[in-house]
Image (tube, rainbow, N blue to C red):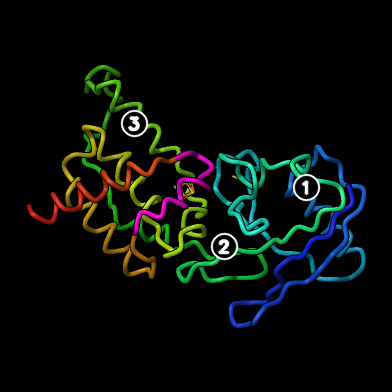
């Protein structure tokens, strides 16, 4: 495949940045989107140019490091798919593809396609710890968990913290991410002692980091590579109201 890429180039946080066009040739349809960028970067390096900076780690859809706007859509055109798992066969030979970083006030651009998602760490840190006895591992059936709760907690825990939900949200809200993190502990018995303080502190950290509020636009769940459902935001609101009343 031969493609034209229009990629956001920005030297650092204070640089204005701009779209720059590149041609890439002989790309295999079986290459991933990141492998296609690797091909471009190898050529740029050989030509003595600055390669395009982008985040990645596992390239298996589990670490949450990769993420970019591809033709204006977070993680690109395939649903429930991270950028690293997106393959070039979903594009056509001759396509022009726009590639940009996440756009959100709370995710400042570090360079090119790399943004600082440290605000997510702050929200998780604000959630604190759980109270659990240490020592020998308890028997698996010592703390019964209803199957329906175990499944829901597991589903929430699959959030990989990629930030696509924020990038897609017209308000730059991180409510889907925060809801997933609040739910995966709040659904389990081990998460109950700090349940109220956890949700209050995480929402406080969310707002302080500059993320916007949720207005139920639903864009977040559409682009979420892990299919985190919007219902978790309803659950978060319920938890928050209950904790605030208490
Ligand atoms: S909720 Fe989905 S889109 Fe948002 S950070 Fe988690 S995995 Fe990424
Ligand atoms: S590189 Fe780890 S999820 Fe994409």
Residue 219 on the magenta span: yes
Which region of the structure is painted magenta? 215-227
Task: Indicate which disc, 2 or 1, sits on the residue closer to the N terminus.
Answer: 1
Q: Which residue is mark 2?
A: 102
- Spatial CA distance of label 3 from label 1 is 34 Å
Q: Which residue is mark 3?
A: 152
Indicate which label's residue lies in the foreground, 3 or 1: 3
- By secondary structure, the bulk of the magenta-drawn segment is best described as loop
Callout 2 touching callout 3 (CB < 8 Å): no
Task: Indicate which disc, 3 or 1, sits on the residue closer to the N terminus.
Answer: 1
Q: Is residue 215 left or right of residue 159?
A: left
- Spatial CA distance of label 2 from label 1 is 20 Å
Residue 167 on the magenta span: no
Place of residue 227 in the rendered image (x, y in percent of width and height, measured from the top left): 47, 39
Task: Indicate which disc, 2 or 3, sits on the residue closer to the N terminus.
Answer: 2
Q: Is residue 36 left or right of residue 134?
A: right
Q: Going by the picture, which residue comes out furthest to the front?
A: 217
- Mark 2 crowd level (few <14, some 14–19, many ≥20, 10 Å Cα): many
Residue at coordinates 52% horizontally, 53% vertically from top-left? Answer: 164
Q: Which residue is mark 1?
A: 35
Residue at coordinates 70% horizontally, 64% vertically from top-left? Answer: 53
Q: Circle 3 sits in a helix, a strand or a loop, which is it?
A: helix
Place of residue 236 in the rendered image (x, y in percent of width and height, measured from the top left): 26, 48
């Amino acid at each position: 495949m031969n493609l034209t890429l229009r990629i956001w180039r920005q030297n650092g946080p204070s640089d204005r940045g701009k779209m720059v066009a590149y041609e890439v040739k002989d790309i295999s349809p079986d290459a991933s989107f990141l492998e296609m960028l690797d091909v471009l970067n190898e050529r740029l390096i050989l030509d003595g140019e600055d390669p395009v900076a982008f985040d990645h780690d596992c390239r298996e859809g589990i670490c949450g490091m990769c993420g970019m706007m591809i033709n204006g859509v977070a993680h690109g055109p395939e649903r429930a798919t991270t950028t690293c798992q997106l393959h070039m066969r979903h594009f056509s030979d001759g396509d022009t593809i726009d590639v940009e970083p996440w756009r959100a006030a709370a995710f400042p651009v570090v360079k090119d396609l790399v943004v600082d998602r440290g605000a997510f760490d702050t929200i998780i840190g604000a959630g604190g710890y759980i109270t659990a006895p240490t020592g020998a591992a308890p028997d698996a059936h010592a703390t019964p968990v209803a199957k329906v709760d175990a499944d829901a907690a597991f589903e929430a825990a699959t959030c990989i913290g990629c930030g696509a939900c924020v990038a897609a949200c017209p308000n730059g809200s991180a409510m889907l991410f925060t809801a997933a993190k609040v739910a995966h502990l709040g659904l389990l018995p081990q998460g109950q002692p700090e349940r109220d303080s956890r949700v209050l502190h995480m929402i406080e950290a969310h707002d302080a980091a500059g993320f916007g509020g949720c207005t139920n636009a639903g864009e977040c769940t559409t682009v979420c590579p892990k299919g985190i459902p919007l219902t978790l935001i309803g659950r978060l609101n319920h938890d928050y109201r209950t904790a605030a009343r208490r």
